């Protein structure tokens, strides 16, 4: 409505023109229109505004003025219909060059949404309609149609302009919401108690455990199945014995994550644990970082403003840009996580069109930048390559750099500076164990050493799982927390999935893998718990979690986890040319594999010695893990630790098979916090409104005895 009235205000020159023209004062009409439109444009220029339709209208009046000087009688006879036709040509011409004329006016009222595709589509529709209506008015006047025809055209256009945008916006927003996921099917009804459980979960990784815990909390009977002896997927800890000076010593290592985001009050992980009532069961230790670069050591302070100032001192020519960049990232971060309010800390764009319409105004930074490339945001503030490299220091938490990251993916990583990263005392298994406890306390069950052979599908819907030992577990729905490629290329029979979907997954590369060297050493190194080495010829991450949790190593000792990402093209070269199943036992025991593994690990130790001199002399225990190791224990394609490349990621939680949803890296990518979000969204897909509901409706019925592990 406001936009419509604004347009009417700017059409005053035409109103004066038509009023004088109706009284036979053609020359005065043209002069008035030209002067008023020129005055309007002078006012626009003073405000540094350009309204394309008004410039086109000024051109119309200027042409009329020239025509009046040359052939006054002819222009007097045709000025009315030519004015409408001219406006129609201007409107449609601007639309042809993708500048809908109404967008100049509506941008002032909806500045926060002006760059969105929906904004363009709505304005294109209204502008195109008016272009046609202007031509229709011109034709009506040329044919000298009855006055009511012109009146009807104008009234119709006015009504559409007043009410149409809202309807069009709601339609566009509904389409936008629907576009978040590729597949749409109604949530199942969990009213069949003849099934063994309501939901079967394939995989006890963090995504699967998060989904299971939330579904159990909603009152559903859940059963989780995993091939491993420990729950948590990569998020688990394991002990290793060694001997030191003739005496036994014990170290505790983490298979994967050591630096957890989303643990702050209102954050994703904290919100999940709070909802489940188990937050007090995990004690978190703050992790400090250090970057060892060509520019020297950089130890980020715990206050992000101090860190931005520190980087400004290191890169003085970029100081102002760095501070501005961090302030912008912080604003985006706040906007993104504000959406977790009322959703147990799980962020996500609103699913209601009216709330989504308000999102750009309430969260302008998040709306503007979430879908934009992160490197464009950085480039808008900082150009020094060395400064940019440090700003991007944590990109390894998301991938190997082979894929461009959006702000929506990268900004949450800055939560390590804004809110801190944390380690669960007792090891990463403590987090997964607490989720298992929450599931079991609500009547659910977690079955380890119970690999799934097949996801059962009947009549186009998932209906349970078949285990490798031959047992069948019937369920109303299935959550797959398994590797997404293996889920749909191995666990689901081919006839049940669309051919194009299978083809996409077949062609999609697994995400990056990694190589790790786990060390137990006989001293406590003087480094930060998370030290990132980026020196010429030496690139390695060092996680020293015993510095914040001494229980991981004997007194006077420490554990070190040396980490290097291995891109897929390199990772696949670690595997034998022939299929090795899920174990590759013969290959793992071959001299070729053992030699390569030893050499690669030695190189990483050499890199670590850039900041830990004589590290080799202090090693008491060592074990290395290659991409083959990760594939063997996690059953991930090519040992991927971050799911699948973006080309193969599922959009949303719902798969093409009804009642089968995905949780984990298969749709969100890397990170513990990310897969918690994925698990929560999988639960929400099966029980809409779950995250906004009150927690605590507990199930008490466990699996029947025939399905027990």
Image: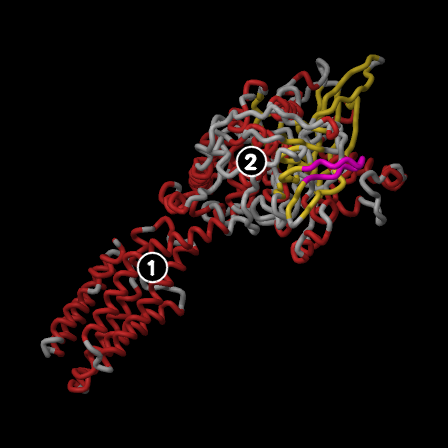
Q: Nearer the viewer, residue 198 or 403?
A: 198
* Residue that carries the numbered disc 2 in the rendered image: 680
Q: Nearer the viewer, residue 212 or 92?
A: 212
Q: Mark 2 and mark 1: span between their CA atoms?
A: 38 Å
* Residue that carries the numbered disc 1 in the rendered image: 103
Does 371 sit above or below residue 305? Answer: below
Residue 257 percent location from the top left of the image: 65, 31
Occupied quadrant, residue 273: top right
Q: Earlier in the sequence, mark 2 or mark 1?
A: 1
Secondary structure character of the magenta stretch overall: strand
| 258 sits to left or right of 591 | left
| 696 sits to left or right of 88 | right
| 491 sits to left or right of 17 | right
**Quadrant location of the N terminus in the rendered image:** bottom left
Residue 254 percent location from the top left of the image: 70, 27
Which residue is at a point 69% across and 35% down the rendered structure image?
203
Crowdedness near tag 2: few (<14), some (14–19) or many (≥20) residues, C-alpha within 10 Å: many
Which stretch did the figure color magenta?
A: 464-474
Element at label 2: helix
Q: Nearer the viewer, residue 12 or 63?
A: 12
Image mark count: 2
Q: Can residue 656 be spotted in the picture?
A: yes
Which residue is at a point 85% across and 13% down the rendered structure image?
246
Does 342 sit above or below residue 521? Answer: below
Q: Is residue 328 magenta?
A: no
Q: Can residue 390 be spotted in the picture?
A: no
Which residue is at a point 54% across and 28% down the rendered structure image?
272
């Amino acid at each position: 409505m406001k936009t419509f009235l604004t347009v009417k205000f700017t059409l005053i020159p035409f109103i004066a023109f038509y009023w004088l023209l109706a009284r036979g004062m053609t020359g005065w009409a043209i002069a008035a229109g030209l002067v008023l439109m020129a005055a309007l444009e002078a006012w626009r220029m003073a405000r540094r505004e350009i309204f394309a339709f008004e410039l086109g209208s000024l051109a119309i009046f200027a042409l009329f003025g020239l025509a009046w000087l040359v052939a006054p009688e002819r222009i007097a006879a045709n000025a009315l219909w030519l004015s409408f036709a001219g406006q129609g040509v201007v409107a449609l011409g601007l639309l042809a060059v993708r500048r809908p004329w109404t967008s100049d006016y509506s941008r002032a009222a909806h500045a926060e949404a002006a760059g969105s595709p929906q904004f363009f589509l709505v304005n294109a529709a209204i502008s195109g309609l008016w272009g046609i209506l202007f031509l229709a008015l011109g034709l009506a006047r040329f044919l000298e149609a009855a006055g009511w025809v012109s009146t009807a055209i104008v009234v119709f256009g006015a009504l559409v302009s007043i009410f149409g945008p809202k309807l069009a916006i709601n339609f566009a927003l509904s389409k936008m919401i629907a576009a978040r996921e590729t597949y749409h099917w109604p949530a199942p009804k969990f009213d069949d108690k003849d099934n063994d459980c309501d939901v079967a979960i394939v995989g006890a990784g963090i995504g699967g455990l998060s989904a299971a815990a939330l579904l159990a909390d909603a009152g559903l009977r859940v059963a989780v199945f995993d091939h491993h002896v420990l729950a948590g997927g990569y998020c688990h800890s394991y002990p290793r014995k060694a001997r030191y000076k003739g005496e036994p010593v014990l170290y505790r290592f983490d298979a994967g994550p050591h630096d957890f985001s989303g643990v702050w009050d209102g954050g994703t992980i904290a919100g999940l644990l709070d909802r489940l009532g188990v937050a007090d069961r995990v004690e978190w230790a703050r992790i400090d970082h250090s970057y060892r670069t060509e520019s020297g050591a950089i130890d980020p302070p715990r206050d992000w403003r101090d860190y931005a100032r520190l980087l400004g001192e290191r890169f003085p020519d970029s100081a102002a840009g760095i501070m501005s960049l961090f302030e912008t990232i912080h604003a985006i971060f706040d906007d993104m996580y504000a959406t977790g309010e009322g959703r147990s800390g799980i962020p996500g764009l609103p699913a209601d069109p009216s709330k989504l319409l308000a999102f750009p105004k309430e969260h302008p930074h998040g709306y503007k930048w979430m879908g934009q490339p992160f490197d464009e945001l950085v480039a808008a503030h900082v150009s020094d390559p060395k400064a940019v490299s440090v700003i991007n220091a944590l990109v390894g938490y998301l991938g190997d750099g082979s894929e461009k990251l959006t702000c929506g993916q990268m900004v949450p990583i800055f939560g390590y500076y804004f809110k801190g990263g944390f380690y669960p005392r007792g090891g990463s298994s403590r987090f997964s164990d607490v989720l298992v406890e929450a599931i079991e306390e609500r009547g659910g069950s977690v079955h380890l050493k119970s690999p799934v052979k097949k996801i059962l599908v009947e009549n186009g819907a998932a209906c349970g799982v078949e285990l490798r030992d031959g047992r069948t577990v019937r369920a109303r729905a299935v959550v797959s927390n398994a590797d997404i490629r293996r889920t749909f290329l191995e666990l689901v029979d081919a006839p049940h999935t669309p051919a194009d979907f299978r083809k996409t997954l077949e062609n999609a590369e697994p995400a990056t893998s990694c190589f790790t060297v786990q060390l137990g050493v006989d001293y406590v190194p003087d480094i930060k718990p998370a030290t990132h080495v980026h020196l010429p010829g030496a690139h390695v991450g060092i996680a020293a979690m015993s510095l914040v949790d001494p229980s991981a190593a004997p007194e006077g000792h420490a554990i070190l986890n040396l980490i290097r990402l291995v891109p897929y093209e390199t990772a696949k070269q670690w595997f034998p040319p022939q299929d090795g199943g899920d174990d590759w036992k013969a290959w793992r025991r071959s001299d070729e594999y053992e030699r390569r593994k030893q050499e690669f690990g030695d190189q990483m130790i050499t890199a670590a010695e850039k900041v830990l001199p004589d590290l080799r002399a202090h090693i008491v225990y060592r074990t290395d893990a290659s991409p083959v190791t990760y594939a063997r224990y996690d059953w991930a394609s090519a040992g991927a630790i971050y799911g699948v490349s973006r080309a193969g990621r599922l959009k949303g939680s719902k798969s093409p098979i009804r009642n089968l949803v995905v949780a984990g890296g298969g749709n969100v990518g890397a990170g513990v916090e990310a897969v918690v979000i994925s698990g929560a969204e999988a639960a929400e897909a099966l029980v809409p409104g779950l995250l906004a509901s009150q927690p605590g409706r507990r199930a008490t019925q466990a699996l029947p005895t025939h399905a027990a592990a």
